[in-house]
Amino acid sequence: MKVTLACIAAAALALPATAAARDSLGIFEGWGAFRDDRPLRCFAIAEPVRPGKGAWRPFAAVAHWPGRGARNQVNIRLSRALAPGAQVTLGIGERNFAMVAGGADAWAPDARTDAAIVAAMRSGSLMSISAQAASGGRFTDSYRLRGAATAIDAAALGCARRR
């Protein structure tokens, strides 16, 4: 299944939009890279293989916030709301990462884990995140990683030029 430009753009719009402008930095396979001006942030983003038809659009993003000194922050909007206290696990190849989660979002617990996830994304082909849904049962959202490394690099460069 090929992800279209419209799907990637829709996923980018799912991010909180307090920005004055959103610029496209490029589309790379199933991943897009974008820059917001205010506050300055750049991010790579993709939709899962099967986005579903829920109340919101799930996505995986890797963001750079120069004003906060933050790079390669991983954020995933899950396709379903989480059960209270649900453990969320992100898997890439043989690596598994415990995530911090709340509502329908998951993040790496610290900058070191962000860096490890991004490194695994660069060499992996598929990323999956699993958790217990608030409605019951486990679910998994999967992302193809082809194009992710290039989109992450484009996002980093997009903010580096604007400092």
Image (spheres, helix red, strand yellow):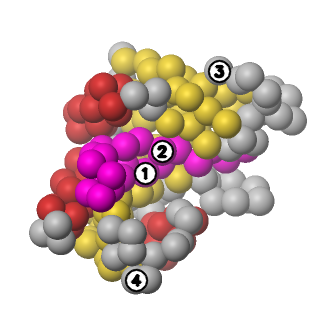
In this picture, residue 137 sits left or right of residue 47: right
Q: Nearer the viewer, mark 2 or mark 4?
A: 4
Chain-order first, disc 1 or disc 2: 1
**Given the image, on which type of amino acid does mark 4 rest?**
Ala
Kind of element beneath mark 3 = loop
Q: CA distance from mark 4 to mark 1?
A: 18 Å
Q: Amino acid at mark 1?
A: Ala
**Quarter of the image where the C terminus is located:** bottom left
* Amino acid on which disc 3 is placed: Gln
Bounds of the magenta segment: 60-80
Residue at 69% over, 32% down: 139
**What's the residue type where badge 2 is placed?**
Asn
Which residue has dot 3 on it? 87
Q: Residues within 10 Å of mark 3 (few under 14, many from 20)?
A: some
Determine if residue 75 is in view.
yes
User: Magenta stretch mostly in which secondary structure?
Assistant: strand
**Tags 1 and 2 in contact by the CB under 8 Å rule?**
yes
Residue at screen point 56% across, 37% down:
106
Q: Residues within 10 Å of mark 4 (few under 14, many from 20)?
A: few
Determine the CA span between mark 3 and mark 1: 20 Å
Asked if marks 3 and 1 touch (Cβ < 8 Å), the reply is no
Q: Earlier in the sequence, mark 4 or mark 1?
A: 4
Residue tagged 4: 21
- Eye-nearest disc, 4 or 3: 4
Task: Pick whichever of labels 3 and 2 is earlier in the sequence.
Answer: 2
Report the residue marked by disc 2: 75
Give the image quarter of residue 113. Answer: top left
